[in-house]
Image (cartoon, rainbow, N blue to C red):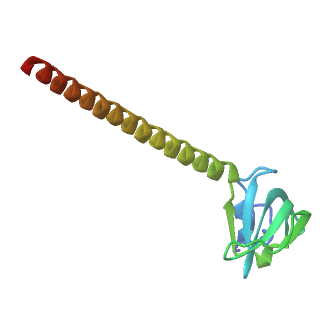
Amino acid sequence: MLFQSSFGVPFSSVNPIVGLFNSHPIGTRLGIGTDSSFWVGNFGGIRDCVAILTNAQLFANMGKPIDGIRPLVRIPIGQITFVSLNNERNENNERNENNERNENNERNENNERNENNERNENNKRNENNERNENRNNRR
């Protein structure tokens, strides 16, 4: 018989969406999509064909928050269209690294400008000194 274990008990029908959660430990920050919006929150598990998120916020598909943060959200498995990691820390780290790079680039550019200005000033002083020496030598 099809879909029967070796003990004669048929396998239970489990929605394949549940497999999307298998590798995520409790507390993982996830994004769970539904028809026209998505929830971002901490994975709290699956129970009675419902995915549970804690400290979750609802967003429109365009990324704009729809509602405030809720302590507990229950999303029926049948309504889920996608599950994704939502690691805000990585996004913040990338932003911080980019900001540091930009600051370093600005510092380097400013240092180069300062060095060029100093060279130019030194060159002008040297030229003026040479002119003065030439004038003194002519007298």
Q: Is residue 89 above or below residue 3?
A: above
Between 67 and 35, the one nearer to me in the picture: 67
Q: Which residue is drawn at 27% across and 27% down?
A: 125
Q: Which residue is drawn at 50% across and 46% down?
A: 102
Q: Quadrant where the N terminus lies?
A: bottom right
Residue 9 visible in rendering? no
Between 64 and 30, the one nearer to me in the picture: 64
x, y (%) of residue 70? 90, 64
In the rendered structure, the answer to whether residue 91 lies left or right of residue 55 reads left
Q: Residue at x 68, y 48 (%)?
A: 89
Residue 86: which quarter of the image? Answer: bottom right
Residue 133: which quarter of the image? Answer: top left
x, y (%) of residue 82? 68, 71
Q: Residue furthest left?
A: 138
Residue 91 visible in rendering? yes
x, y (%) of residue 134? 11, 23
In the rendered structure, the answer to whether residue 126 lies left or right of residue 107 reads left
Q: Residue furthest bottom?
A: 35
Between 138 and 36, the one nearer to me in the picture: 138
Between 13 and 50, the one nearer to me in the picture: 50
Q: Which residue lies furthest to the front in this view?
A: 139
Q: Is residue 10 above or below residue 44?
A: below
Q: Which residue lies furthest to the right in this view?
A: 71
x, y (%) of residue 91? 63, 53
Q: Quadrant where the C terminus lies?
A: top left
Number of numbered discs: 0
In the rendered structure, the answer to whether residue 130 lies left or right of residue 29 reads left
